[in-house]
Image (tube, grey):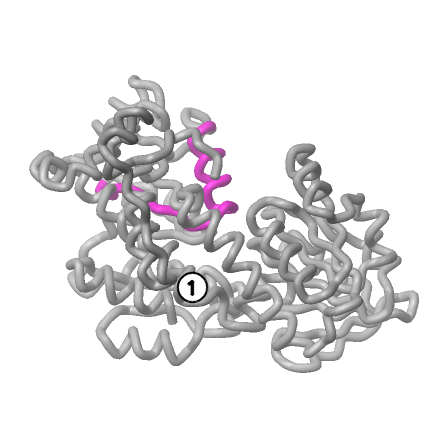
Amino acid sequence: IQTAVLIETLKALGAEITWTSCNIFSTQDHAAAAIAAGGTPVFAWKGETEEEYNWCLEQQLKAFPSGKDLNLILDDGGDLTALVHQKYPHLLQGCYGISEETTTGVHHLYRMLNNKGKGHGLLAPAINVNDSVTKSKFDNLYGCRESLVDGIKRATDVMIAGKIGVVAGYGDVGKGCAQALHAMGARVMVTEIDPINALQAAMAGFEVVTMEEAAPLGQIFVTTTGCRDILVGKHFEVMRENAIVCNIGHFDIEIDVAWVKKNATEKVSIKPQVDRFTMPNGRHIILLAEGRLVNLGCATGHSSFVMSCSFTNQVLAQIMLYKAGDKAFAKKYIEFARATEAEDAGAAPQKEVDEAQAKSSVERMSTGVYVLPKILDEQVALLHLDHVNAKLTKMTPVQAEYMHLPIEGPFKSEMYRY
């Protein structure tokens, strides 16, 4: 539903849109139907197969009512970006750029940027929406803190209090999940590869262990890493009876679902997206959403308010990409002029920039991966303060001079850690 509002917003701003889902279970069919009825080509329904999902991505590229090719990409997870780069790279010549929503998708963008010149490089400028503070510190943390438990409860109706919960990863998503389980009365263990995140988890009162230590003890397992092979065969073999296993990272490879399906002696589908597998040792594992995003597969994802923060960033990113070459626009809306000031930090070497621009049929930012300027990040937060009855203190001119800050912001450096 929240994505439907994003689509309507982009249409109101003059965009021509085609849409697909980023997850085979995340579509709410009534929302997709409403958007389609409004004239937007939508290729998505809840419960797609992998083949149908890939078919939808392909159809999306050919469905603009005007018959034109795409000139902007708004992605969540990187599948559409990867498809266009691998099969339709010519479309990127007329593309102003890409905005990416998720941690996983952003990792792929940086990997592509680092692979330039090796045959798998990034061919258009991209904005890393995920690392806007008003996305990562709100959607990832506060959003997951509520939607994780919503998904688990709707799927299983299990009592969380007293259970041992295992959270793999302690980034912003992991932090929100660990807090949520703890608030419901679970005893929480955390696994981490990063010593800083591990220390944060320990200082927050969580037991930091390896998955080998946690697997025989946990009753609810949540993967949040965006990596692969977090829960594999050796872990499933020692899990307790009716251990609940779910993922809120991104793709279904965090949990080795293929191993579970191959080695289980029986599978019982309790209800949609809730499957109980019998392991060779006779114990059972309850897998939610087939290892895909549990908050979307078993519930309705994040609340509208926190998604408003995220999608406001997406809209601003699309505007920034499209208007990058419009000097009059940048002069009128000075916040967007900061984008060009920040180009050097994310751009490719000048030779590659010149070559990429020569191949492009539109005036656009240099090929690179960027974040939105701090002033726009602060504007997103400002737009949402009234809804939570928050009143902002304003510095006096003397205070502003003392701090060497403009009274209207930005108030923090680009390097500030919130």
Residue 37's spot in the image, x, y percent?
A: 26, 79
Q: Residue 86: which quarter of the image? A: top left
Position of residue 358 in the picture relative to residue 313 (left or right): left
Q: Residue at x 34, y 19 (%)?
A: 349
Q: Position of residue 74 (x, y in %)?
A: 34, 52
Give the magenta range. Answer: 94-114
Query: Which residue is at 66% across, 55% downward?
Result: 178
Residue 341 left/right relative to 77: left
Up-down relation of residue 96 to residue 217 (above or below): above
Instruction: Report the front residue among 91 and 171.
Output: 171
Q: Name the residue under label 1.
A: 21
The picture quadrant where one finds residue 125 is: top left
Residue 98, how many percent across, how many down? 33, 44
Q: Is residue 179 above or below residue 288?
A: above
Question: For the N terminus, which image quadrant?
Answer: bottom left
Residue 148, located in which quarter of the rendered image?
bottom right
Up the image or down, 53 lies above or below 45; here it is above
Could you tell me if residue 175 is visible in this image? Answer: yes
Total marks in image: 1
Q: Which residue is drawn at 59% across and 70% down?
A: 151
